[in-house]
Amino acid sequence: MLTIKEIAQRANVSRTTVSRVLNNSGYVSEKARSEVLKVIEETGYVPSQHAKSLRTKKTKVIGVILPKISTETSSRLVKGIDEVLSESGYQILLANTNLMPEKEIENLRLLKSRHVDGIILSATNTEPELMKEISQLAIPFVAVGQDMPGFSNVVFDDYQAAKDAVQAFIDKGHKRIAFIGVSESDPAVGGLRKKGYLDAMAESGLPVEDSWVQTGIFDLDSGRTCMKDIMETSPLKPTALLAVTDRLAIGAIQYIKDSGMTIPGDVALAGMGGSELSEFITPTLSTVDFMVEEAGREAAILMLELINNNGNNVIKRNIKHRFLQRDSI
């Protein structure tokens, strides 16, 4: 393997000059730069990333922890992150928790042992054990989706997004609006979206029957089961439903269709997430688009700012959302 010393000898320049050309730093005359690049091109020299990491104490790798790597939301988030980081010469290393909180801590430790330059976590909880682990990282850290005091965050307005969706139903004359959520151990998706629903109903003077509010998990079948429970246990049937994810809403749609009801004639629906699938089902699904790719880009920009400032600042970025009203309402 060719060394910097050998390149310097072939180009008739110093090793310092070769290093400056490879790292694009410091002054190098155009003639010397040209000679070095000529040797590199002729020999096909590729600098050792490991050796560079030893010199700079930087790996140029950012760890990204995802709750479920197979979902569209994760894919869109990673796309936004990679767009920004790749432009600055960084690579990303993905880790999957499969919605298991203990895997978040496990992956934080794993990525730290791999000497990544920073970690971006698409978080599903703010439990004390997780917060303690993050505080011990000693490398730049950015959370996406959960507001973590003391750490840099990119967050959505989950509360207002749920209120906006409920208001869309109310504007169409609906008064009996049901809700499918998830566990409030997820403060953003489980807690804030439910609070937004309840507050929107209360502010409009609308009642909420206990049977109208169901808690599921993040999958299609759970949406179907929760919708079944709502319709089969409620003496007063709801005419509209808000689900905290598009997958839960699509599962609910399946139950409604199988039961011979129509959408939005018998039941109007909305999900949250702005998934691509929401545009292609019948009827098209009204949904909240959280601009996840933009969140990924903002998380990456924030990470680079933290790296350049030695990770000392705590910064919070808020991502706007939009309600997409479609045929399901």
Image (cartoon, grey):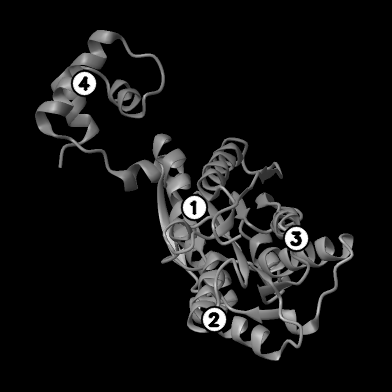
Dot 2, how many residues are within 10 Å of its Cα: few (below 14), some (14-19), or many (20+)?
A: many
Q: Nearer the viewer, residue 130 or 261?
A: 261
Are the residues tagged 4 and 3 within 8 Å (C-beta)? no
| Residue bearing mark 2 | 224
Q: Nearer the viewer, residue 184 or 132?
A: 184
| Residue bearing mark 4 | 36
For the point 76% across and 59% down, which residue is it? 170
Dot 3, how many residues are within 10 Å of its Cα: few (below 14), some (14-19), or many (20+)?
A: few
Q: CA distance from mark 2 to mark 1?
A: 27 Å
Q: Secondary structure at mark 4?
A: helix
Q: CA distance from mark 4 to mark 3?
A: 73 Å
Q: Earlier in the sequence, mark 1 or mark 3?
A: 1
Q: Earlier in the sequence, mark 3 or mark 2?
A: 3
Number of the front mark, 4 or 1 = 1
| Residue bearing mark 3 | 173
Q: Residue furthest left?
A: 42
Horizontal and vertical percent position of residue 314: 71, 45
Horizontal and vertical percent position of residue 232: 65, 90
For the point 45% across and 41% down, which residue is it? 85
Q: CA distance from mark 4 to mark 1?
A: 39 Å
Against 218, is 17 above or below? above
Horizontal and vertical percent position of residue 1: 15, 42
